[in-house]
Structures are given as C-alpha cells and as structure tokens.
Image (cartoon, coloured by chain):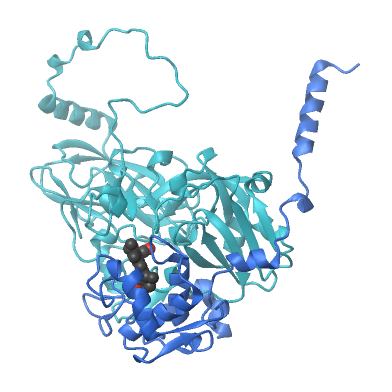
Chain colours: A blue, B cyan
Amino acid sequence: MRSPRALAVGVLAAGMMSHQPHAQSFGRTPSASEIAGWDIDVRPDGAGLPAGGGTVAQGRAVYDENCAACHGPEGRDGIRDRLAGGQGTLASGQPIKTVGSYWPYATTLFDYIRRAMPYQAPASLSADETYAVSAYILYLNGILPAEGGLDRASLPRVRMPNRDGFLPEREFTAGWTAAR
Amino acid sequence: MSSAPPLGRRRLLAASATAGLTTSPAGADTLANVPAREPGAPLSARSERSRFVELGRVPEAAPGIRPVDPVDAINSKTPFDRLVGSITPTDLHYERSHAGVPDLDPAKHRLLVHGLAARSLVLTMDDIRAMPSVSRVAFLECTGNGWENWKAADPTLTVQNTHGLVSTHEWTGVPLRFVIDLVGGVPSATWMLAEGADGAAVARSIPLTEEIMAEGILAYAQNGEPLRPAHGFPLRLFLPGLEGNLSIKWLRRLKFGDQPFMTRWETARYTQLQADGRARQFQLRQEVNSVITAPSGMMRVRPGPVRISGLAWSGHGRIVQVEVSTDGGASWQAARLTAPALPKAQVRFEMDWVWAGAPTGIVSRATDEMRNVQPDRAAFIARTGTNALFHYSAQQTWRISAEGDVRNALS
C-alpha cells in the first residue's frame, strides 16, 4: 500500500498533469470576417484602406460637426492638438508639429482618425467620412486643393511635405531601410 | 576620482552626533513619550498604508502643467522623493495613456494573432494564463521621462516631476516567443503591430529583433497580482529596456508584417526632433540613466552628514557603476549599490557625504554593462539639441544653496 505522502505527491502530479496544456489546445481559428472587423491598420503603401472616398467639401462638414469643438475652426486655436500650419518651424526654437508640418505619410492620418477620433466616439465615422475629413485636414495644410478629394487609390500617393524628415534608427530598422 | 578621503566610520559617527545636537536636543527625547502598547485594529483582506504615510502620484497634462484635474491628465508620476529600495509599489507605478483607462472584462477580452504567420488564432485570457509563464523584474519608462528639463530648469520641480515616468516591477506572463510558435512561426515577418483595446487603439510597429523575440512578454501580472487597469488589465505587451509606449497596454491584436505600419505614435508622436529639423525615428532603447532622489528638488539639507540616495537604470542591461559628484561634476566618487543590479531594472545607490554648508551641486552618473556612461547635460544637448521632447537622459543636477535649499538646475 502506498503511504499517504506518496499518494499526495501522486495526486499533486496528476493535478499538474491535467493542467499541462499542449499546443493544439490554445485558442481557436478566427473566421475571415472576424479578422476583417478588427484589422483596421493602414500601411503607407495603402494596404488596409477600405473602399470609399470623400471630398474636401464633404470633409469640412464632417469636421465642423465632429472635430472643430476640440481642434478649432480650421485646425488651429482649439483646446486640443493643432492640426494645421507650422511648416518651416521644425528647426526653430519653437517647432510646431502638425499633420502638415510633421507627418510623413497621409495614410497615417486615415489610420489614426479611424482608430482614435473623434476622441469621445472612436470608430464612429464611416469610411467615406474618414476619407473626407482626412482630405479636409490635408486641404487646411495646403496639401490638397479645395476641389480635391481622397480615395483608396489616391491617398497613398499623397506626398507629405515632411516625408523625408525622418532618420530611422539603424539598430531597429536596418533590414527595412536596406529593403527600401 | 575623489577629492575628499573616504570618511571613516568613527568620523562619520562624530559628524552625525554633532549634526544631531544642532537639530534635535538629545534631552527632549524620552521613551516615556512613546505611547503604551494596546491591542490593534482587526485584521483585514488588504493591507492599507499607515495613516502616517502620505504617498501619491501627480497627474500632469503637459510639461509644466500640474497638478491637473485627472480628466485632463495624460500621465501620472511616481513619487520618488518618498520611495526607497528599487521596486516601485504597485499602486504607484507611473501611468500614461492616450484615451483613458478602459474597464475590460477578462472573460470577454480576446487577443487576435494574425498576419504573416502560418495561421491565425484568437486567444482567451484562460488560454493565455494556462500557457507556461516567465517572470522578470525590469523597469518600464515613458520616453517623456525628463522632458521638463530640455530647455530650462524650473527650480520648483521635485524628482517626482523630473523623473517620475519610470518604475520597476516584477512582470509575469507568457513569452512572446511561445505565442509566435503557436501560430506556426513567422519566418517571413520582420515587424509586428501590437494594438490596444483602449479608446485610441494605440498601436506600435515592433521590429522583430532577436532581443525582442527573446525577451518580449505578454504580461498579465505585476508584482504577483493581475495587472491593474491603469497598467493594461487584463493583458499587455512588455518589452524590457525599450520605450514604454511599445509595451502596448490592454493588448488585443498582434499582426505580423514585413514593414513598419507607420502609426501616428511612431511618426507624429514618439520621434525626436534634432536641431536641424529632422527627427530620429524608432529610437526605441531607453538609455543609461540615473537620478539622485534624496536630497532632491524642494528638499532642505542641514550642514553635516547627508546620505545621498538615488536610482540608476539602463535599457542596455545591468548597471555596473554609479558615481556621485558633490561639487557640481568636478570630481566623482563611486556610490554603493544597495541591491544586486538586474539587467534592465532600476537599482538603488547610496553615498555618504558631509555637507560643509557651502553652495554646490550634487549629481549622479551611471555606467551600464555595455560601458555606456550617462552624459552630462552639455554633451547630451550638443548631440541632440533641445527640441527632441522625448528620450532625455542627461545627468540631473540638484543645486544646494547656502541655506541648504535643494533645487532643480541644468548643471
């Protein structure tokens, strides 16, 4: 007969065994539509952009209704981050970093608005509204004309004024910069 | 190295007795004044701090904008002026978020792992907690730590204001590597997007370096308990030694790719403007750093023995040496580490000093195992300019006036 001590050890081991997982037992495979619902990022080459489009004029209406309260009437003088102007200030004692003066990729604007803005109701704008308000912010920065607009094809082609203003750190980006 | 000979124990005791006499007359103290013993309060489910101990963070809205109503705050700083040892108390770990602190139900939380991987997976918190775990004591530091002193030194700042955006905890979770193996490996991926379930869905592209693959953790616990909401409950990424915002809180998605995704945080936000108007990008490592926490900003010292105490840390590895100068950086003496230095963790140092009463500056400098030495401010600014906003790691000088007032200074 086994001693109580040996029995206890055996029980303990069995208990541990029953929690001992094997690889296949973790998680489940998501459906393609589940992934699509969460896969919100947009890359500089345009990968991830949804169908749709919007104009500067449409964007002004979206902006006035959803954004101006925090970012000011024309992307300036709001209670939150300034979104326009500042070009030519980056090497001065008082650099002003805005979408127009600092951001290297227009795709980042779409990505950021889609994931984070308007602040109090993220992800509440449609794809068309997001294209439109992105176009309007680029217009406020002199990057798109008043009659301009954006869609999946044109957004990645927008050349931002500060596109070449960044120095990627070699230690972390060597492979990527070499591939460019 | 040192200008003054090391103080013998005898002399130190003598000095402290003299100082003692000038401050608290020995005759006033009597054991008769110590309250009598009595039965204490009932035991409890949680240990609260003593009513005699006052500890709290300071919420801030921007450099110099503090204290603020917490709804306007973007960060909240650790009170290093009142902490000892090397580990940060759980509730005082610094806090930074971009859209507040979400209230996530772990039963409903999911992690989606997909992209350039052999297969995609959805994991529950039960799945993740059932995986083999690792624990690691390491610091986490906001890239904004030190941002108060880029252009000028406000003399009213405490060390909580200047350096309160770094903390050290034991973090527990699943090795990143384990999850990568679960999806069948990611041989063609070089970058990984990590995304949070917060209102801003904060997301960063993480280069899949050997170091990150080996040391990354999907953490669900801090100091032995589930993460607190402010720190990412129920799940966060933890990347030792690298800028804090990479350690995405409230982690809900990992996507593998072959190039950076260029989110707002790695373009518009956490990039460092240099003097020429160009910006360093993916400057991810937290450099060797140290600060004297006592005596520090807004404290007062008296002539006589002063024990200098502080913290040192480096994203490159272990701290191997901390030196302290009590003459504004002219000469240096080795400080003593009060605990074993762990890689990429804060460690406390101490040094005994006798302040003669003349105005001076006290400053520390740390050296890590890769032989990186913390630069003085002039050398640091000559290299980076004053516009970078993030990644400030120059030596911190505290000026001491003839009256003994300790104040923040540039050098």
Q: Residue at x 60, y 62 (%)?
A: B254
Q: Residue at x 33, y 7 (%)?
A: B38
The picture places residue B213, in percent across and down from the top left corner, at 61, 61
Residue B277 versus residue B392 in the image, above or below: below
The picture places residue B41, in percent across and down from the top left corner, at 38, 14
Residue A107 versus residue B36 in the image, above or below: below
Q: Residue at x 26, y 85 (%)?
A: A88
Residue B18 versus residue A164 in the image, above or below: above
Residue B121 versus residue B128 in the image, above or below: below
The picture places residue B315, in percent across and down from the top left corner, at 46, 58
Report the side of B183 relative to A45 (left or right): right
User: Which image quarter is the C terminus of chain B in?
Assistant: bottom left
Residue B382 shows in the view: yes
- Residue A105 sits in quarter: bottom left
B242 and B38: which is toward the camera: B38
